[in-house]
Image (cartoon, rainbow, N blue to C red):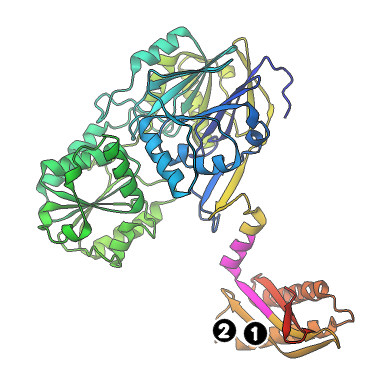
Amino acid sequence: MKFKEEGDTKIFALGGLGEVGKNMYCVMHGNEIVITDAGMLMPDSTLMGVDYVIPDYTFLKKNEDKIKALFITHGHEDHIGGIPFLLQTVNIPLIYAPNQAVGLIRKKLEDRNIQYKNLIVYDELTKVKFKNIEVSFFRTTHSIPDSHGICITTPNGTVVTTGDFKFDLTPIGPMANLHKMASIGKHGVTLLLSDSTNALNDGFSLSESRVDSALSDIFEKQTGRIIIATFASNIYRLKHIVDTCKRNGRKIAIFGRSMQNNIEISINGGYIKNKDIFVTAEEANHLPLDKVCILCTGSQGEPLAALSKIADGSHKQIKLQSNDVVIFSSSAIPGNAASIGKIINKLYLKGVEVYTNTSLNDIHTSGHANEEELKLMIRLIKPKYFMPFHGEYRMLKRHADIAVLCDIPKENTFVMQNGEVLSMKKGVIKREGLIQAGDTYVDGNRIGDVSTSIIRDRKIMASDGIIVIIASIDATKPALLGKVNISTRGFVLVNDNLELLTELENIARKTILAGLTKPVNYSNIKSDLITNIQSKAFTKTGRRPIILPVIMDIKQKKGKKKDTN
């Protein structure tokens, strides 16, 4: 898209609107673009074989000469997970991030062998000035240390983005800087972008100190091993688990790569002090049961995570015992409830006691603001315009309604989609057009090479299977040589359907013989095979498997075969 007036300031999202994750927001003025966050989204069950979903970076690639810097609000995956892929696609001159996030980003880049030297640590006092844009920061409270909101000042007004936040008056870490938020609001804010994750939840969120107290009560009365599954990225939760173990004389064994990485970075950053409390799995197995705490991944029922293997009895180092206690210090991410339920059932079958977050056990709280906290943020910042971000559409809509309750005119609220542009000029904001935005799939080391057609084929193979037809021909005669072989995976049970498979072989043989013209048209033969075999398969079974014909010409050169697939 070409903007009509260089004098306007443009605000748009490449990810994070209509979804919980993939956060990426941009402010553009003239020849300057500043980016806030570069997150990723974990794929759902429909995106088979996809590892991550990241934003479409096409607009940034086309305008990379305008990019001044990427600013990170905090170190969670939905805000930093896309950085390695962004750096492989777009030239980012500078990345500013708080201390904890810098440690996580460095580890992420090392894992992918990406060299990047311009990673700068900022704190609440840092100010970054470009020709037309100035960026400053204010401390917030979240479930990870060093979380910040960002204030972006432009010639046409001030834009504030909260990042992920909550208001916790008795936090485990530092208090949010309410005074600085109020000061920013007093100086005048044109547009507020605010976290909508918990906009559907009434009241105030539970204080992290209440969770600390609840976990302490469980620790004090248990005489067996305690196994805790929580989010590896919830550093404050990990911190008070460490402190609780210290008070109760327990050593901690860590299981799960992401958990180990976050603990290591938190120790190096000074957020977790008691380094000597950690032991190896072998050491833990030789300690008295009441002196051991196992800290592991798998709170969302992930099949390959440590807790799932422990529940299955397949973990090489940890075997459940009847007096073990398992604590889920987390809440279910939407869509994961069934997986978590399966793990809990397996644990109960092993005879262990299980604690989950209920009205009776305050063993988890969210790092995101509930409705009353969202109102407080709006009252402190006092924006003229309001744009909810980081949430599904229903969350964004509810957050916009909350803003109206806080005296922001309805016409001054914008429930946006990724790629929609707001134009700000002399303190007035209006909608203005679209830029390219969407999803990019990452499959292993492939970025953007996984198309919707590939995903569709994977879904078909998962539900209807695949049929492979292998035939050898002599193209010089032309003639079919030997038998047509059919193999199948995920279509039907071979031993129970020999008659059907024989029928398919006969159809394939007739189709190939009918297509043996001189010269041989391999494309026509394959097309006819796909049509005829799929038609018969659907008639007999109601399924539409992927048909993969492999035609080999074995007379092209002496001693060589030519595969025409």
The C terminus: image quadrant: bottom right
**Closest to the observer: 276 or 509?**
276
User: Relative to 511, is 320 on the left or the right?
Assistant: left
Name the residue at 50% across, 40% down. Answer: 83
Residue reaching furthest top? 187
**Closest to the observer: 468 or 211?**
468
Residue reaching furthest bottom? 482
- Image location of residue 207, percent across then percent down: 27, 31
Secondary structure beneath label 1: helix
Q: Amino acid at mark 2?
A: Val
**Closest to the observer: 505 or 198?**
505
Gap between marks 2 and 1, in whole Å? 8 Å
Q: Is residue 466 inside the magenta stretch?
A: yes
- Image location of residue 421, percent across then percent down: 64, 26
The N terminus: image quadrant: top right
The part of the chain drawn in magenta is: 456-469
Secondary structure beneath label 2: loop
Quadrant of res 74? top left
* Majority secondary structure of magenta residues: helix
Q: What residue did someone put label 2 on?
A: 494
Q: Residues within 10 Å of mark 2 (few under 14, many from 20)?
A: some
Q: Amino acid at mark 1?
A: Leu
Q: Is residue 529 above or below residue 106?
A: below
User: Relative to 505, is 442 on the left or the right?
Assistant: left
Q: Is residue 322 inside the magenta stretch?
A: no
Q: What residue did someone put label 1 on?
A: 501
Q: Residues within 10 Å of mark 1 (few under 14, many from 20)?
A: many
Name the residue at 55% across, 81% down. Answer: 493
Q: Is residue 348 above or below residue 245?
A: below
User: Relative to 103, is 397 on the left or the right?
Assistant: right
Residue 265 numbered tag: none
